[in-house]
Image (cartoon, rainbow, N blue to C red):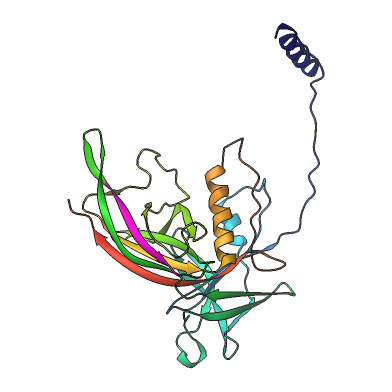
Amino acid sequence: MRNFLMIIVAAVAFFSACEKDISVNLQQQEPSLVVEGKFETNRYPQVVLTRSLGYFSEIAPATLLASFVHNAVVTVSDSVRTMTLKERIVEIAGLGRVFAYVPDTSRPAAAFRGKNGGRYTLKITADNKSYEAVTTIPLQGLHLDTIWWQRVRKENDTSNARVWARITDAAASGNYARYFTRTNSGAFLPGMNSTMDDQVVNGTTFEIPLDAGVDKSKRENPETYGFFKRGDTVTVKFCNVDKATFSFWRALDFAYNSTGNPFASPTKILGNVPGAVGYWGGYAVTYKTVIIRK
């Protein structure tokens, strides 16, 4: 043991003596197209296009505003019909008012809504480049049966509550879901771990807690994370998704939760838009609401 410690001390002294400044010349990468597209049951599609920013770029409002991609040609097809999306300013939970591509709903014949079991192709032409991605709005392989709440006691504090869900999985394996929660009249927000699959629970009925959704632009209090308050009205937005959408958000959740952890494994975010960054995802949506008594 003594010899081992002497080796460590000698090594530290050696590397300390050899310490010097090293300048690393990072190659500048061309900005990539970033796609954030979704198509939900009984709703119109919505696609946000931006350009990627450098890792060391200054993130300022003007920089973010300049990152939006304008004048792109964006279409969505269900193999029978094709609709062209137009650029508008829309309100998106967690982002505020942003530029997005949406259908012209003033012309009903030129727009259609998402349906469970549908397969949809997104095509984008921007900056003289073309991109194409396919997603599905799957059938509800994971079925949200019911939700309820339970009181959480922390010492003498009984103001917190947790929401639980009972879910039934279809016999066929390979079902995936993502969930959001809304408190009172707030926005639908995902939990820190917002995805699930049926790898372990295939063909069964199971019960799990659903954490309160979080605004990831704000720091969460670990003492109260996941809880709702007595008196809240909670709505769960439960979405069946395909494997590509599940994989994208599972990796993104993991990366977010690993921020600041020096022992976390590097995470590669896999999108489903070849040549671009991001995803085009379909959501088969179910809503359920519970009122937490005071």
- In the rendered image, the residue lying farthest to the top is 2
Residue under the point 47% across and 62% down: 178
Compare residues 233 and 174 and report the one nearer the observer: 174
Q: Where does the magenta region start and end?
A: 161-170
- In the rendered image, the residue lying farthest to the bottom is 109
Q: Is residue 210 left or right of residue 113?
A: left
Picture layout, residue 141 above or below residue 148: below
Q: Quadrant of residue 181?
A: bottom left
Q: Quadrant of residue 87?
A: bottom right
Q: Is residue 224 left or right of residue 51?
A: left
Viewport quadrant of the N terminus: top right
Residue under the point 48% across and 59% down: 95
Q: Position of residue 160 (x, y in %)?
A: 26, 45
Q: Is residue 49 visible?
A: no
For the image, the number of numbered tags is: 0
Compare residues 189 and 166 and report the one nearer the observer: 166
- In the rendered image, the residue lying farthest to the left is 294
Q: Is-magenta flag for residue 163? A: yes
Q: Position of residue 171 (x, y in %)?
A: 47, 70
Picture layout, residue 71 above or below residue 196: below
Q: Is-magenta flag for residue 44? A: no
Q: Is residue 21 visible?
A: yes
Residue under the point 81% across and 41% down: 25
Is the stretch drawn in magenta largely helix, strand or loop? strand
Compare residues 32 and 294 and report the one nearer the observer: 294
Compare residues 21 and 182 and report the one nearer the observer: 182
Residue under the point 45% across and 87% down: 106
Q: Quadrant of residue 18?
A: top right
Q: Is residue 18 left or right of residue 133?
A: right
Q: Position of residue 228 (x, y in %)?
A: 30, 50
Q: Position of residue 196 (x, y in %)?
A: 48, 58
